[in-house]
Image: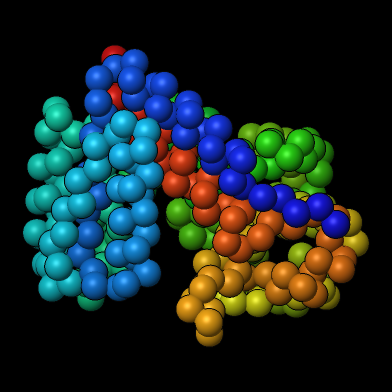
Amino acid sequence: MKTLTGKELAAAIRVQAQAEAAAGGQPRLAVVVATDDEASLWYVRSIAKAAAGVGIACDLVDLGPGARPEQIDETLTRLSGDPGVHGVMLQTPLPPGASAQWLAAAIDPRKDVDGANPLSLGRLAAGLPAFAPATAAAVMALLDHHQVELEGRRAVVVGRSTVVGKPLAHLLLDRHATVTVCHSRTRDLAAVTSTAEVLVAAVGRAGLIGAGHVAPGAVVIDVGTNPADDGGLTGDVDFEAVAGVAGALTPVPGGVGPVTTALLLRHTARAANLP
């Protein structure tokens, strides 16, 4: 079995982001946070660190876990209208009563570097220029990097979120894959996933995909990042069990995650260079 790591690809994308950032002055990314969830705070700190490494300024706008939806909306609107800010990102989870989909509509699509605004998703579905959600784009970049053929192949995406599952289905369709999307109401999940030549797990349930869910020789992409008992991360795929069946499999961590962060930075550099 081949392990589809993302570290080498992420490093190459960061080099591209650094070159594009240098070409148009210093880009600035604003990440709006309204949570005290430690995993989310760790993630945004890692974004800021990675941004500094490629010459992108990153402002963490921490509104606190008690922020009102109106306050978050006003902040996103203000940042979208600030000519000194080139990328705007809303980190989840959000306080009770705050809807990520509703709030993301306040982000200018030209600055929507994580593809959260419904307009961005609509443009993506229509095949028009838009920033794709970084995680969905990372899956495609990883498949391309490891030369996984998509045209005419059966692809199954487990998960229908607007940040991974739905946009990824559109991206796979654009590459002429035959796509099935599964979700919590799918009957006999294993019967569907075991037909896939390319299987993507993006649900957020540790170990959901086992050996019985995977066709022999399939390419399996694990998007899950779930807290493990030892304090680390584990994916949606039971790595040890599936490794004996799959032809190729991404690790967690070290697979999709590093590529996602690198693409977020490249999107920001490109947003800064839009005419």
Q: Is 168 on the left-hand or right-hand side of 25? A: right
From the top left corner, tell me how far across and down residue 89 is, in percent: 29, 47
- Residue found at x 29% / y 25%: 272
Q: Quadrant of residue 44?
A: bottom left
Height in image: 234 above or below 79? below
Q: Quadrant of residue 235?
A: bottom right
Q: Is 18 on the left-hand or right-hand side of 217? A: left
From the top left corner, tell me how far across and down residue 123 is, in percent: 43, 34
Query: If the image is split into quadrants, where does the C terminus sit?
Result: top left
Question: 243 or 133: which is nearer to us?
Answer: 243
- Residue found at x 87% / y 66%: 245
Q: Is 145 on the left-hand or right-hand side of 214? A: left
From the top left corner, tell me how far across and down residue 114 is, in percent: 38, 44
Question: 224 or 171: which is nearer to us?
Answer: 224
Q: Quadrant of residue 133?
A: top left
* Whether residue 195 is visible: no
Residue extending farthest front: 53
How many labels, in total?
0
Query: If the image is split into quadrants, where does the N terminus sit?
Result: bottom right
